[in-house]
Amino acid sequence: MILIADSGSTKTAWCLADSKSTNTQKIFHTQGINPFQQSEGEICEVLENELLPSLPHPFPDINGIFFYGAGCTAEKSPIVAKALRSVVSRDARIMVESDMLGAARGLCGSSEGIVCILGTGSNTCYYDGRDMHTCNPALGYILGDEGSGAYIGKRLVGDILKRQLPKSVQDLFFEETKESQATIIQKVYREQLPNRFLASLSPFCARHRDIPEVSALIKDCFSEFFKRNILVMKSDFNIDSRIVNFVGSVAYYYQQELKEVANTFGYEIGNIKQAPLEGLVDFHVQK
């Protein structure tokens, strides 16, 4: 059996699959695992308390673990690998790669394409069918992550608290979220994982996209994503393709706005998937 994981900062999707067939598989979820935000001990706690109870009993013979996750850089990946080896399997082959490579393999398999993540965070690469090539770093929710759930949430609360949106929208926000300026400041600046909190506010925009000012906010966030991440690719990699592929909950639930913004920049949307796990299972079972 092989264990495949697609992890964002908010949620990790796992699939236990037969290494020779896509017909036998079990899918389950845990909270997100991100080695930039969590220590090895905290990751072990998630694995012990959420992953292990979800696995079949008796414990399956896992000979390969393929983990794709946010924050899994060359420097941080060993932290996740060590936790997986300690908690899940000491003998399995363990591979830990970035969520960006997971998105590329899940969307494109062995074909080339422009691949983007729009979830809690955001990222972009050109995938040549084997390796990914990046232009601009994602930089996280403070310096980057344009178009992501955290970015939309950050822009939303900033505009609410700075009174850049109509009072009717401000009142609606406070009524629905039960937040206040004090609780927002507390959760953003003093509590753990503020990016998750900010991303949790993004659905407010989806629910009220019919309000012109909210619709404009959404599209402005996606415009920033294209300007700061996609437009630089053509010159950097000499890419002729005008088709962009997306994975992530934000891309999935804001498809219409994303398509409209893409068209204004001369691009078309190719594949949009809420998660790359199904494609990753196909990729690794074929291997």
Image (cartoon, rainbow, N blue to C red):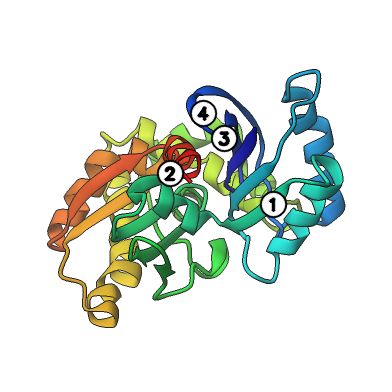
Whether residues under marks 2 and 1 lie with C-beta atoms below 8 angstroms apart, the answer is no
**For marks 4 and 1 on the same chain, the one whose residue lies earlier in the sequence:** 1
**Residue 170 seen in this snapshot:** no
Q: CA distance from mark 3 to mark 2?
A: 26 Å
Q: Nearer the viewer, mark 3 or mark 2?
A: 3
Judging by the rendered image, the residue that carries numbered circle 2 is 248
Q: Is residue 56 above or below residue 166?
A: above
- The structure residue drawn at horizontal position 58% and vertical position 29%, both measured from the top left corner, is 18
Residue 259 position within the rendered picture, expressed as x and y whole percent measured from the top left? 20, 47
- Residue type pointed to by label 2: Gly
Q: CA distance from mark 4 to mark 1?
A: 43 Å
The residue carrying pointer 4 sits among few (fewer than 14), some (14 to 19) or many (20 or more) residues within 10 Å by Cα, namely few
Q: Nearer the viewer, mark 2 or mark 1?
A: 1
Residue 89 position within the rendered picture, expressed as x and y whole percent measured from the top left? 80, 42
Figure quadrant of residue 132: bottom left
Q: Is residue 281 above or below residue 112?
A: above
Q: Which mark is residue 176?
A: 4
Residue 170 position within the rendered picture, expressed as x and y whole percent measured from the top left? 45, 41
Residue 72 position within the rendered picture, expressed as x and y whole percent measured from the top left? 63, 60
- Residue type pointed to by label 4: Glu
Whether residues under marks 3 and 4 lie with C-beta atoms below 8 angstroms apart, the answer is no
Q: Which mark is residue 19?
A: 3
Q: Nearer the viewer, residue 22 or 67?
A: 22
92 on left or right of 167? right
Judging by the rendered image, the residue that carries numbered circle 1 is 94
